[in-house]
Structures are given as C-alpha cells and as structure tokens.
C-alpha cells in the first residue's frame, strides 16, 4: 500500500505570502525562504519555487543565486529529490491575490492525496481540488522533492499582508489534512465523489508589439475564479475601454489577476471541470 510516513509541511516558499510564513513560525514547520520573508518579498534573487528541477539541484555553481543555494540546502535537509530517503509527502502553503478560497493543487493522482482531498472538499465549503500533473524530475516546484505533494493556494489575500480569517482557515485545513494522512495509513478513509479542476493552459494579457500589456482583467471576470467562462463572455477590458470577449472553449479560469504572475506573463490559468468517483 502507498502509505505516507514522512510528511513535511512548509510555508514561506514565497516570502511575501504571509499565511504560510506565520503558520510555519507558529508550528515549527519548514520556513522555506527566510531571507525573502525577512524583507517581505516573493524572493531575493529568483523564484525559489522554480529552483527544484533535478538538473538545477545537481548542477555546479549557483550563478550567485541565494534561492538556488537555498533549494540545494533544503534538498539535502529533507532527504534528496528522487532518492529513497525523500519525504513521502510535502504540503506547501501559498497565498494568492485571486479569489481561489483554499485550493489544493495536486501534482499527481496518488490515491492518498485524492482521497484526503475529497474528504476535505466535503468538510470545508471553500476547498477546490486543482489537478496540475507534473513530470517530477524536471518540475521546478519545492513539493517535487517528495514522492508526492500538495500545494495549498489560499486567497484572496494581498501579498505582504495577513487575513486572520484565512490564517485560521488554512491552519484548520492543514491540521485536518495531517489527521487524514493518519486515517489513510490506517485504511480508514471513505471513498467519495469529488470535483476537480484540471489545468489546461495559461493565458497572457493582450500586448502591443513592444510587449506592454494593453488590457486589464474585465471587471465582470474579476473574482470569478472557478466559474464557467463561455465564448462571448467578457474577459479583458482595454485601456481604450473596449471589451475583449472570450473566443475559446468553455473553461473555468483560476489565478485570475494574480499579482505575482504579471512578471510571468500569465493573466489566468484555464481549467476543465470534472466530476470523479474513486
Ligand atoms: Zn506562492
């Protein structure tokens, strides 16, 4: 059986996502990027959560990047990505400025993760299950050090701030998650129906020839994460006041207008809705 013995909880992988920073401090969990947290920034040199591809962890030289050096340190500390001593599970806590409630991002269809997430989605009304399958070796995310992982995205919360309600919501979910890991190991988890949102692709803002954005998220779409978006519905509003309508397939956007994704060229991620039975 796929039992989950070694679990690591971490927060502050992004230093300005304060729910995870302060939960990690409160509970003695791994504070992944203390240098960035100390200056209340996402990162110091580069995004820590893009440093965990095996080829980067194993290469020589850091390119003077504080984060790559920290990624290698965490990899040593936890028991090395891809090895037998790696953790069974990493739960990594993030915030988003998007209206995503508490979204559990699963990078694999590990049966324990699916069943635990299904129970949590039943118990907490603001939980969504987001499938983002990764080929683990070259995935750059911290969670991929472990054999399987879940990333919590909690929002909306402006980066660099704390919402007390969200703090305690996320704490409750993480502590319940750990109880359910025990229940899974003891074979006591019920099977149930659940809903998932599977990532299809990211889309960028409209841009001019110089690469400057020319439109904003449409007010009718702002805050509508995980709601249906159909062809003909407004998606962007240009600086000239013209509406841009969605012309693609029916989908369910998430990470709508996420502040940290402007630098990544992502206006939102499109997902597909599924109903699943274990
Ligand atoms: Zn983050």
Image: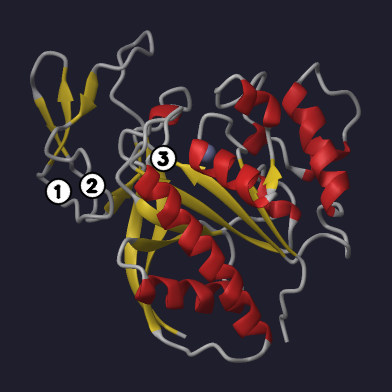
Q: Vertical placement of 106 versus 145: above or below?
A: below
Q: Position of residue 259 (x, y in %)?
A: 39, 28
Mark 2, Cα crowd under 10 Å, few <14 / some 14-19 / many 20+, is few
The secondary element bearing badge 3 is classed as loop
Front in this rendered view, residue 129 or 7: 7
Q: Which residue is mark 3?
A: 96
SS at badge 1: loop
**Residue at point 44% right, 78% down?**
119
Instruction: Tell me the distance, in whole angstroms, between the alpha carbons under discs 3 and 2.
Output: 25 Å
- Taking the image as shown, residue 90 lies to the left or right of residue 219, namely right
CB-based contact (under 8 Å), mark 3 and mark 2? no
Q: Are marks 2 and 1 in contact (CB under 8 Å)?
A: yes
Q: Is residue 113 left or right of residue 226?
A: right
Measuring from the top left, give residue 20's x and y in whole percent.
Answer: 55, 44
User: Which residue is disc 2 drawn over?
Assistant: 248
Q: Is residue 77 left or right of residue 8?
A: right
Front-lying residue, 219 or 119: 119
Tell which circle, 2 or 1, labels the residue nearer the N-terminal end: 1
**Which corner quadrant of the image does residue 175 belong to?**
bottom right
Left or right side of 67 for 240:
left
- Most foreground residue, 254 or 250: 254
Q: CA distance from mark 3 to mark 1?
A: 26 Å
In the image, residue 153 lies at what x, y percent? 46, 49
Circle 3 crowding by C-alpha within 10 Å: few under 14, some 14–19, many from 20: many
Q: Is mark 3 within 8 Å of ligand 1?
A: yes
Q: Which residue is mark 1?
A: 231
Picture coordinates of residue 277 (x, y %)? 41, 85
Colour pattern: secondary structure
């Amino acid at each position: 059986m796929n039992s989950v013995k070694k679990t690591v909880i971490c927060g502050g992988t992004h230093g300005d996502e304060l729910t995870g920073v302060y939960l990690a401090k409160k509970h003695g969990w791994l504070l992944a990027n203390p240098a960035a947290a100390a200056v209340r920034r996402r990162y110091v040199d580069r995004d820590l959560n893009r440093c965990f591809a095996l080829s980067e962890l194993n290469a020589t030289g850091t390119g003077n990047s504080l984060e790559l050096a920290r990624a290698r340190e965490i990899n040593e500390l936890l028991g090395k990505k891809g090895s037998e001593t790696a953790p069974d599970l990493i739960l990594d806590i993030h915030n988003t400025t998007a209206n995503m409630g508490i979204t559990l991002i699963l990078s694999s269809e590990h049966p324990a993760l699916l069943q635990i997430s299904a129970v949590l989605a039943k118990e907490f009304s603001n939980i969504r299950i987001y499938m983002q399958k990764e080929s683990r070796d070259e995935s750059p995310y911290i969670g991929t050090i472990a054999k399987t992982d879940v990333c919590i995205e909690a929002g909306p919360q402006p980066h660099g701030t704390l919402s007390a309600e969200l703090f305690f919501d996320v704490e409750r979910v993480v502590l319940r998650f750990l109880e359910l890991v025990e229940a899974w190991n003891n074979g006591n988890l019920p099977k149930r129906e659940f809903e998932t949102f599977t990532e299809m692709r990211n889309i960028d803002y409209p841009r001019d020839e110089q690469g400057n954005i020319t439109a904003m998220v449409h007010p009718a779409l702002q805050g509508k994460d995980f709601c249906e978006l159909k062809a003909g519905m407004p998606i962007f509003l240009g600086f000239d006041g013209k509406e841009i309508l969605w012309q693609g397939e029916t989908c369910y956007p998430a990470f709508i207008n996420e502040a940290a994704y402007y630098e990544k060229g992502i206006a939102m991620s499109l997902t597909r809705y599924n109903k699943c039975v274990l």
